[in-house]
Amino acid sequence: MSVPYTPSRKCGYCFGISNSIRITLSCSHRFHLDCIERWRERNENDSCPTCKWMGQRFYQCARCALSVHNHNDGFAVRCGCFYHKECLYRQIHQNLYNCSGCHEQFNAAVIHYMGKFSKQVTYVPIVNLNETE
């Protein structure tokens, strides 16, 4: 019998169990942001502390928990947590001013920036296939 994969809640560096894991590497190992930064300060390469694989870093959105793949799509707030711009936009416009990841209050600059962020909307016509002409 197969069992569905569930990602570990343990940090690959300190092995602490926490919901505050914020970075997932391409090799799928997960870390606290401060743990991976400590590893990177001590090592000259960008390897994974667990498997030593060198690859691209992915940050986890504090609101939707999906990976933020690049800086065009992502936004880092002062507390160090990452968001998709769309997720942070929605959170600010719902008057939720605390970070979903660490619960620190957003500073005024983040709230001001997201208030001016223009959301791109595409409208698609809906066709009723059951309608007879």
Image: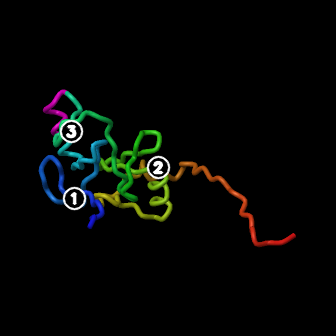
Of all residues, the one furthest to the top in this rendering is 44
Mark 3 closeness class: few <14, some 14–19, many ≥20 residues within 10 Å: many
C-alpha distance separating marks 3 and 1: 17 Å
C-alpha distance separating marks 3 and 2: 27 Å
Front: mark 2 or 1: 1
Q: Position of residue 87 (x, y in %)?
A: 45, 56
* Closer-to-camera residue (96/133): 133
Report if residue 94 lies within the magenta region.
Answer: no
Q: Position of residue 50 (x, y in %)?
A: 16, 43
For the residues labelled 3 and 1, say whether their Cβ atoms are less than 8 Å apart.
no
Q: Position of residue 17 (x, y in %)?
A: 16, 59
Indicate the amino acid at tag 3: Cys
Front: mark 3 or 2: 3
- In the picture, the disc for residue 48 is 3
- In the picture, the disc for residue 85 is 2
Compared with residue 9, is residue 23 higher up or lower down, i.e. above or below?
above
Indicate the amino acid at tag 2: Lys
Indicate the amino acid at tag 1: Arg
Indicate which disc, 3 or 2, sits on the residue closer to the N terminus. 3
| Residue pictured at 21% horizontal, 34% vertical | 47
Q: Which residues are magenta?
A: 37-44
Provide the residue designation for mark 1: 9
Q: Position of residue 109 (x, y in %)?
A: 42, 48
Compared with residue 112, is residue 47 higher up or lower down, i.e. above or below?
above
Mark 2 closeness class: few <14, some 14–19, many ≥20 residues within 10 Å: many
* Closer-to-camera residue (75/73): 73
